[in-house]
Image: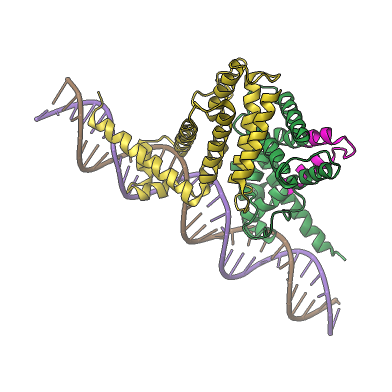
Chain colours: A green, B yellow, C brown, D purple
DNA sequence: TTCGATTTCCGAACACTGTTAGGAGTTTAG
DNA sequence: CTAAACTCCTAACAGTGTTCGGAAATCGAA
């Protein structure tokens, strides 16, 4: 049972998070400031430490939230699509998220690294709700259906597709952000070609 | 003719740059501090402003230097190789640089964006000494030799290859940095498969 | 209801950051 | 030799994240 106090606590925690996310998407990641967050929420700087132990904790929470948003965007792609279209649509959702939230996306992957521990054996035990995990599952679905039979493991195949998609997303979110080029069309063609290559082999 | 004064000036400018680069590669990008650079070089913080107008200018110079190092690494790949091997080797050099200087590499692309102006027409006028430019030239070489005839322009083909390579590099420099996985082998296979797909079409 | 404990929140301070103004001391050019 | 240009520093300013101590509010139980 959740007491009123707990509900209040979580609500202002969420408010802090929302303010941080909005500041990142609106003014850029380097403008994120504890004191500005506090000011916007009518708190003193020290008051925030009742809800987060440090700025680093806020950043971690912001990244975690961004990751679930990215995964949610990918999960809205209907899994009923033919595998080829499904994989392309997944990648498109990934890149679209990056294009629409360039600062947020870049910030996520600057501050999120899988910790050195927590990754023993081969690799299947990556974070559960990860953009990569969704891709892996899709590729495995294809392999079990006999459609994808490329040499390496399903993990390696998913990694290469992820790299392509992540590269397009990162470039458009950072280096090429202001380049007037029809990335959406080029991305789609590149992914279709890549996926076709995976199925042919 | 360069006066002794100019030579001195440039030498301490380079020293500042070197110190900054070393601090980034050794302690991470967020630990870069004007005052620490000054301390290491026996300057007062204000003294550095004789050589750089702001911290931002130092960062720009650091990024520019990193870019030429990356391009140099790519230019050491013998252009006499068969196109297929040449493209793969170029990508390998790119990723290897990122793997060996993860903080530096990530820092470069966080702080370097092609400015909104300076990019009028279609796109061929990107920065001259760019990792991307090297790829474009290689792809154009292949197209003129009749080996690469994929639908899109050479620019689009080079972009897709760049995205794949840049994605692998970025992932290994940030999110997957501590994952014990044989990326070198997987990367090579992925690039060979991708390039083969380009030549088949 | 009342009392004690817990939770919330803030003011003040600390150590750090990048940056600027102003003025010494040195080097250079005519 | 002199005046201009260049180097470099001290001191200060505004900003940052963080901690400490205490005041106020809230809560749980007698």
Q: Give the percent coordinates (x, y) of residue C11.
A: 59, 58
Residue B54 visible from this viewpoint: yes
Q: In this image, A116 relative to C30: left or right?
A: right
Q: Which residues are magenta?
A: A65-90
Q: Is residue B200 magenta?
A: no
Q: Residue at x 66, y 29 (%)?
A: B196
Between A127 and A100, the one lying in front of the other is A127
Q: In this image, B109 relative to A71: left or right?
A: left
Between A176 and A128, the one lying in front of the other is A128
Q: Main structural element of the magenta stretch: helix, strand or loop? A: helix
Q: Give the percent coordinates (x, y) of residue C18.
A: 47, 42
With respect to residue B30, does B167 lie above or below? Answer: above
Q: Residue at x 69, y 55 (%)?
A: A122
Q: Residue at x 67, y 56 (%)?
A: A48
- Quarter of the image for the C terminus of chain B: give it: top right
With respect to residue A193, does A75 lie above or below? Answer: below
Q: In this image, B177 relative to A121: left or right?
A: left
Q: Give the percent coordinates (x, y) of residue C20.
A: 42, 37
How many labels were placed on the picture? 0
Q: Residue at x 78, y 45 (%)?
A: A134
- Which quarter of the picture shows residue A83? top right
Residue A31 visible from this viewpoint: no
Residue farthest toward the right in the current orientation of the protein: A80
């Amino acid at each position: 049972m959740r007491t009123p106090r707990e509900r209040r606590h979580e609500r202002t925690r969420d408010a802090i998070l929302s303010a941080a996310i909005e500041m990142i998407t609106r003014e850029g990641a380097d403008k994120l400031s504890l004191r500005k967050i506090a000011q916007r929420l009518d708190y003193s700087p020290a008051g925030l430490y009742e809800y987060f132990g440090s700025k680093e904790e806020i950043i971690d929470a912001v990244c975690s939230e961004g990751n679930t948003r990215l995964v949610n965007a990918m999960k809205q792609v209907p899994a009923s699509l033919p595998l080829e279209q499904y994989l392309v649509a997944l990648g498109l959702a990934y890149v679209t998220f990056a294009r629409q939230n360039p600062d947020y996306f870049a910030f996520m992957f600057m501050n999120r690294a899988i910790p050195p521990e927590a990754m023993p054996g081969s690799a299947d035990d990556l974070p559960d709700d990860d953009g990569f995990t969704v891709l892996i599952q899709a590729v495995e679905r294809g392999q079990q259906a006999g459609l994808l039979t490329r040499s390496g493991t399903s993990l390696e195949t998913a990694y290469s597709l992820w790299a392509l998609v992540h590269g397009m997303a990162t470039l458009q979110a950072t280096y090429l952000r202001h380049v007037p080029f029809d990335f959406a069309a080029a991305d789609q063609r590149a992914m279709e070609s890549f996926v076709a290559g995976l199925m042919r082999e």
